[in-house]
Image (cartoon, rainbow, N blue to C red):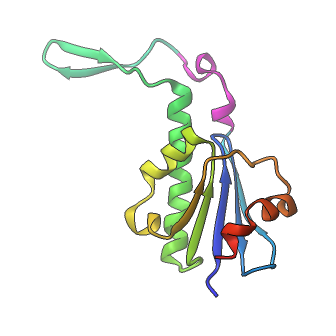
Amino acid sequence: MAITWILVANASLARLYANYGPNKGLKLVKELMHPQSRLKNKELVTDRPGVIQSGPGGSYESHTQPKDQAARAFAQELAQEFHKGRLRKAFGRAILVAPPNFMGMLNAVLDAPTGKLVSTRLEKDYTKSAPPVLAERLGGCICL
């Protein structure tokens, strides 16, 4: 049976679990934290908004909030972790669990071959759930 990686994440915390089959529970593989995503926008900005040159005599200000940029950077970090795991053949199937906004960021940065290994996407924030509770909540997904 293939190993299933289960990512339970939000914009500032991610826990990566492995499941080795039905009734085997969850084993914590890695915990990643991104404290920048917990900061307020004004705490992430050191000076005036960035100005981007668009050509001769023109420029525009970036409208992406610093907090969103921090969350996207964390999503990219998690996508890289999955990419590396896929290349090492560390898992054969994946389950992603994240709040809707962060799930969208994850989906946007996962490469296509890794994305094909994702069998289930749950738009929930279960980052505060203990592994036994999480295993119970995901029981139907894990036993596929």
**Quadrant where the C terminus is found in the figure:** bottom right
Quarter of the image holding residue 31?
bottom right
Magenta region, mostly helix, strand or loop? helix
Give how far across and how far down residue 63 sits, in percent.
40, 20
Residue at horizontal 72 percent and vertical 81 percent from the top: 21
Decide if residue 90 is on the left or right side of residue 112.
right
Give how far across and how far down residue 87 sits, in percent.
48, 75
Residue at horizontal 77 percent and vertical 59 percent from the top: 137
Residue furthest out toward the bottom: 1
Up-down relation of residue 56 to residue 37 (above or below)? above
The stretch in magenta equals 35-46
The stretch drawn in magenta includes residue 38: yes
Give how far across and how far down residue 94 sits, in percent.
58, 68
Give how far across and how far down residue 43 sits, in percent.
63, 20
Decide if residue 1 is on the left or right side of residue 113.
right
Query: Foreground: 121 or 40?
Result: 121
**Quadrant where the N terminus is found in the figure:** bottom right
